Amino acid sequence: MKHNNSEKLSVLEKVGYSLGDLSANLVFQTLMTFLAFFYTDVYKIPTATATLIISSVGIFAAFVFNPIMGMIADRTNTRWGKFRPWILWTAVPFGLVTILTFSTPDFSEQGKVIYAFITYTLLLILYAANNLPYAALSGVITGDMNERNSISAYRFIAVMIAQFIVQVLMYPIVDMVGEGNRAVGFEKVMTVLAVVGTIFLMITFFTTKERIVPKPDQNSSIKQDLSDLFKNRPWVIMLILTTLVFVTLALKGGMYVYYFENFVSKPELALFLEKLGFDNFVDPATYGFSLFNAGGIIFMILGIMFSKRLADRYGKRDVFGIGLFLSTIFLILFYFYGPKSITLIFVTQILHGFFYGTTIPLLWAMIADVADFSEWKNNRRATAIIFSAMMVGLKLGLTTGGSLVTAILGHYGYDPDLAGQTDATLHGIQLSVSIYPAIPFLLGIVLLFFYEINKKAELQIESDLKARRIL
């Protein structure tokens, strides 16, 4: 089959593809932002037990099911392609299990633990079966590097929309529709998001097309695929980098709700909100948390808008590294702010969001480049197993960061039933939105010095592969 590498993608296809990420992120952002809080404060599972559930299930999903799913997807052959069918097949089950995961049946403590373990396991398995082929699809929609940068920008605007819905709107809506009962609120909100997400996945399936097809005579074994993988240094680096990035995102993202509920001064926050015109709130922490996330997300979107232009000119690697470094500086600043430093907290979040935003589309575009690098070097294409690096890293990062949230809270003596937390607990929460999440970002910056696909290499790989595919 001929590879149409130069075809420009329509806006409809780019939007249709991006809706798949919007759907997945309605779930992923909820897991990253609220799963620990949902387990400890809503479903009343002890912090140590919540840590065990999040860590054990996440490690299983990352290291067992994700690589298997990558191999299965690369060997799927249907009239719809390799990856699109998985988006269709998993859409409805994924939505149903999402609702179950955020439901709170009235079981005994042991029953709650078993229920949480089973539903979270099913959710991560279905997430992998849906999202790994979805991610791999971006590597076969087009072989044009600039079009890939463009589609990455579209999909991460969609990610930001999902993030805005979850991190800004969800918490107040949960309180409102649950009429103060957060268990009821979470179940109602997640039901709506699951239905909308399922519809979006269907749209993704019907509006996209796979154009890059492996040569008919390509017949590599699983052993050969794995051998190619671990000899591919850019892939190894991207696996570790992705893990580190999502450790930070899950740790700080999951801790922010505790930060506003416990660390930030509620009287000072109420005054700050009143100055901005918010005067009909019941709980300043709920609305402060939402506004804090809103500022970060809006400026992340601005950062995304600069990302493609910068990457086209300077290369993905260099733009990613500089953006990550600048965003880390503003992350560290949170350590120096007290409970009453409300304005500084909000301004720093905005600046952190802007610089981190420039990196957001590039992570996924870089892994597509790694798939090209593998084909360029080995003359074999195994897109899904390459993209499994992202899924393994994403799951491992989510698992590690989410587990750290509950583990740190347990270590510093957090008790959801106390009216006020101890100074030690408050210090632990403060560290968890500043110094602790900065460490993985800094390690990721160091790793990028060893990543060899710079701007020059991008152009060489793209040119050589286009020439090969014409033959």
Image (tube, rainbow, N blue to C red):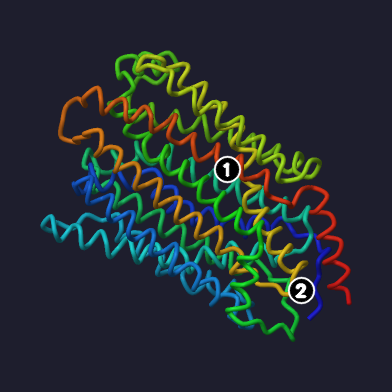
Q: Which residue is mark 2?
A: 379
Instruction: Tell me: 434 left or right of 187.
Output: right
Choose top left, top right, bottom left or bottom right for residue 195: bottom left
Q: Are marks 2 and 1 in contact (CB under 8 Å)?
A: no
Residue occupying the far left of the picture:
108
Q: What element does badge 2 sit on? A: loop
Instruction: Tell me: 173 left or right of 74.
Output: left
Amino acid of disc 2: Asn
Residue 389 place in picture, x, y as percent: 56, 60
Residue 140 place in picture, x, y as percent: 69, 67
Crowd class of label 1 (few under 14; some 14 to 19; many from 20; radius 10 Å): many
Instruction: Tell me: 408 left or right of 391.
Output: left
Question: Which residue occupies 46% across, 33% down?
Answer: 293
Question: Which residue occupies 59% across, 72% down?
Answer: 226
Amino acid of disc 1: Gly
Quarter of the picture holding the N terminus: bottom right
Question: Which residue occupies 49% across, 56% down?
Answer: 23
Q: Nearer the viewer, residue 188 or 65?
A: 65
Q: What element does badge 1 sit on? A: helix
Residue 5 place in picture, x, y as percent: 81, 66
Dot 2 or dot 1, earlier in sequence: 2
CA–CA distance between discs 2 and 1? 29 Å
Instruction: Tell me: 109 left or right of 19.
Output: left
Q: Which residue is mark 1?
A: 444
Quarter of the picture holding the C terminus: bottom right
- 453, above or below 207, in the image: above
- 240, above or below 214, in the image: above
- 18, above or below 446, in the image: below
Crowd class of label 2 (few under 14; some 14 to 19; many from 20; radius 10 Å): some
